[in-house]
Amino acid sequence: MSDDLCTQSSAMNVTVSSLLKSGKPFDCSSDKYAVKGPRVWVKIPFLADTLPDGTVEVQGDNNGLTTMQVHALLDDGTLLSTNYSARDVAKHWRSKGSYGLPVPGTDRPELRQRVRTVYLAIDHPKVVSSISLIQFASKQKWDDLTLPLSIMFAALCGMAIMPLIYNAFFYRALRYNFMLWHSVMISATVCYTFSSSGLIFLFFPGTTLITKMLINYWALAIGVGAGGFFLLRFVEPGKIALWLKVLITTTALLPVLVTAFVFQIDGGYSMDARNYYHASFLPIFFLTLYAMGHALRRGSRAIWFQIAGWTPIILFSLDRVARGMDLYIGWPILDYGLYFMLVLETVILALGVANRILRLRQRHEHTLRQQAELTLLADTDGLTMMHNRRAFDREFRNNQREYRYSHLAIIDIDFFKRVNDRYGHEIGDKVLRVVGNTLNATPHFAARIGGEEFTLLMQKEGPESRGHYPANILAEICETLIRAVDDEVPELREPVTFSIGAASIAKHASLRSVMAKADRRLYDAKNNGRNQVVWIDISPTKPAKPAGTAAV
């Protein structure tokens, strides 16, 4: 009815009768929405033949409304009136944030045909849309639509909440902070949809229209602000320039700061203050559109999800801002599109978050694999692929806490220099690799610590190996080594033998002391003819030199 209605303002004590008697003309010009005064009167022609059957109600945006009056002027000058308190207006909510107040007399067919004009008295209107979006509608039709529309909006809220549960579950494990900002966006979307659609009155009947309007304003401001911070943390590093990050951060905070400021001006209900509120969204909207193209040019893959989810949202939001600033009336049906786009955006970004997490996990796993490979290279002998001295030292230190090994053995290849001299270093390297493979196949911790020198940390005896002394086990290992070299290096025309020195590992013994003892016994094995295991001290003890003597 925006083309046909007219308005005027008055004091709060002016009644409809005194208003009509005064003869003061209503403003039907393009300035009719620039109303001043605590009570706004709206005059609407009632064309009964063009309206649906049954009771007719007058509808409009219910944001911030308080008390209202609805008057029907009959053809004989009779006035039928109904007064509504703020609580009554809230009870007559319609889905998508409208009020629906029955026009007096339209419930009786004989009176309905006689209604000529409807007068509304709106006390302290907070938004122009409470007037500009006024329409006549069938009460029965909207009564029938209340349940299905409520179910639809509840389903939209439920769909939006699902990614919130998903975020909470994965954030505990992954700790990516963009998931927190996405959760704030989802929460704001759910709050806005729940409040502005009218579901809030269904679940919380005591909610006032002022409270509903404040929730709407704050939910949008917080949601848009969180979206800016989500953008900065969701897009891959280096895909948004530093100067652009600073601008996004500033403009993302602007709606929240302006919202807090607006509600200091006339309680936040000044028409000019509302214009400031709506205008505060424009910088972040346009900057986000630019940032999405900017990140796309820099090769971002994650930004595709925001382009798909945010582009329609921004377009719908620009229409909403223009209508909020009363630049034009627009089509209220677009609000339904905004609700669906908000939920669709939540689902699209949830998929984007899942994709981003997958890529981050893949990158993290790749980094871990590289670290493991580097650690392996640092701990591995390049020729034999055995543990090296670094890994051996670390394992011995671990054993001081866990005590899994009972003996340390040093294994040396007898006359290995002669093998290299007679058969070449290539054959010598082959012998070393065979020895390494054979020692790695044992249940003990094997390492190469020198040219032809190897070590074994021997596992503590279990019940199944009780009675197998370390010397016996090492002798069996020697036999296995001799056979392996003979089988796998046929170029050798003489057997390769091994000498071993072994020492027990006391619980708190140092590596240096155990190695010294094993090395001394290896020396004894070498001096005693080689090809043997020595695990007790057999060197004669040298007598102490008397004081004042010297030996050559």
Image: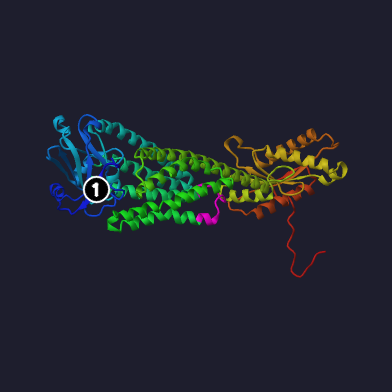
Residue 452 highlighted magenta (yes or no): no
Nearer the observer, 472 or 299: 299
Asked where in the image residue 491 lies, by quadrant, the reply is top right
- Taking the image as shown, residue 92 lies to the left or right of residue 547, namely left
Mark 1 residue type: Thr
Decide: few, some or many residues near mark 1? Use Cα within 10 Å; few <14, some 14-19, many ≥20. many
- Taking the image as shown, residue 323 lies to the left or right of residue 434, namely left
Nearer the observer, 529 or 403: 403
**Residue, far right:** 422
Q: Position of residue 349 (x, y in %)?
A: 46, 41
Q: Position of residue 363 (x, y in %)?
A: 58, 44
Q: Is residue 491 above or below residue 240?
A: above
Q: Position of residue 371 (x, y in %)?
A: 62, 47
- Taking the image as shown, residue 2 lies to the left or right of residue 510, namely left
Asked where in the image residue 343 lies, by quadrant, the reply is top left
- Residue highlighted by disc 1: 7
Q: Position of residue 179 (x, y in %)?
A: 46, 46
Q: Quadrant of the C terminus?
A: bottom right
Where does the magenta region start and end?
A: 233-245
Nearer the observer, 363 or 409: 363
